[in-house]
Image (cartoon, helix red, strand yellow):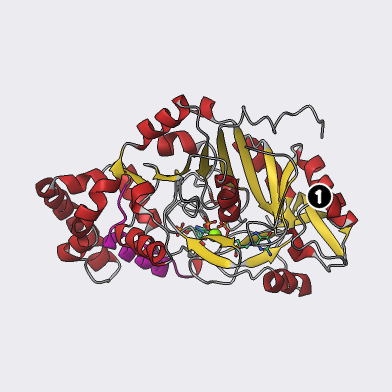
Amino acid sequence: MPEDRLVGDSMKNKNVVVIGTHWGDEGKGKIVDLLTESVAAVVRFQGGHNAGHTLVVEGNKTVLHLIPSGILHPTVQCLIGNGVVLSIPDLFKEIKELEEAGVEVRNRLMLSLDCPLIMPYHIALDVSVEKERGNRKIGTTGRGIGPAYEDKVGRRGLRLRDLLDEQQLLFKLEGILKQHNFMLEQYYGAEPVTLEACLAASLAYLDELKPMMGDVLSQLAMLRRNGQAVLFEGAQGALLDIDHGTYPFVTSSNTTAGAISSGCGVGPLHLDYILGITKAYTTRVGEGPFPTELHDSVGIHLAEKGHEFGATTGRPRRCGWLDVCALQRVVEMNSLTGLCITKLDVLDGLDSVAICVDYQEHSDGQITPVYETLAGWQEASVGVKQYQDLPQNAQVYLDRIEALCGIPVDVISTGPDRAETILKRPIL
Ligand code: GDP
Ligand code: IMO
Ligand code: MG
């Protein structure tokens, strides 16, 4: 990579974005937590509590679903933008867990008044729709994400600000319940959802919510005017994007960098550095195509050594070789500046490693990956903090990814802990 790329110019990168490049769980949470050290605020702009972002600091593990992964840094603001679908009971479950662990949350958390609410009927619908689809199911997290976004786009959804007018809220809820209960009872043969259950999941929290409600767009504009750095935390991954992903086996939001402007109100020209988080191999939870999936001893090695179980649902993750063919498209659709390769240590001990560089399409519609095979490495990369200390063949592997993607690998993660990271070039 040419050295004249000034990614390390600390005056330049004020607004830094973290995006998952495949089907989620690439290690975004760890990297957001690490980079938070240098920012004033961290923002979520899409998705909901379908996300599971794991942070490990000095051996202590925290899993976040809705609250931005900057929360462990005591002075940092955490913002939830209008693009995030909000389950209020789940938000408070997470706040309370953090408070019990001694982390102050409420004074630093701002929720956009325009966040669409996930209500009990969304969860009931998510479960019913999946059941109805049978073996065509998506394998959702069952958190009501899809139905909540459907209500938003259908212009009938409730937003956080609707809690401020009780009479109007009751009026809107009655109409929505009538429609969704009709579907639940008459079409899916499921139990209807009561008004009481909806109020218990929303209005009951109003007094606690009020101090956290705010104008996220204005807050971000103010930070920008003051020259303060902000981190934008993507959830899921680019291949789960509703438009660019493996439709219909996707989530219901745009998970790519284009979603930042609509999801929290920061204009596209105000983004300075977009970091793609890429696992050194590829995983997927739920159904859908996965060309490089492995069912052999290497697949077992990756699942076991990588502890590949979902941070939200606990489901085993499917594992396979790194799909660079898909990654090349992801670099384009997100205008990625650089890559962070995570879980490199999981490849330690393999005789050889493979990278998918193309797909072969067959007449029956099947797709098989075309691989480039590189020598593996027996030395340990786990916990390595300097690039030159990595096993030689691991460096060759990273160099090959750079060359195939045309962007630099600026960060390498060699273990789950915040400290187990190589910052090849500074980002903030
Ligand atoms: P996210 O959804 O992208 O934030 O990722 P998850 O937290 O769902 O999954 C990543 C998992 O890998 C978590 O259990 C992390 O603690 C772990 N992890 C992150 N980076 C590394 C790494 O470099 N090496 C290893 N061995 N584990 C890592
Ligand atoms: P993080 O942020 C991995 C997957 C589900 C399912 C599909 C649709 O931790 O990377 P949904 O409940 O969103 O309607 O499910 O998307 N999925 C994830 N997979 N990581 C995630 O988040 C995911 N969020 C949703 O497994 O296949
Ligand atoms: Mg996850």
Q: Specify few, some or many for label 1: CA neighbours under 10 Å numbering under 14, 14-19, or 20 or more.
A: some
Amino acid beneath label 1: Tyr
Can you give x and y, in whole percent of width and height, for residue 329 in the image? 67, 41
Question: On the rendered image, what quadrant is the N terminus found in?
Answer: top right
> Residues in magenta?
116-134
Residue tagged 1 = 387
Q: Residue at x 56, y 54 (%)?
A: 29
Nearer to us in this view, 4 or 59: 59
Q: Residue furthest left?
A: 167
Nearer to us in this view, 395 or 407: 395
- Determine if residue 373 is in view: no
Where is 35 relative to 273, above or below? below
Q: Any magenta on residue 71?
A: no
* Direction from residue 79 to residue 332 in the image, left or right: right
Q: Main secondary structure of the magenta part?
A: helix
Can you give x and y, in whole percent of width and height, for residue 421 in the image? 70, 53
Nearer to us in this view, 400 or 356: 400
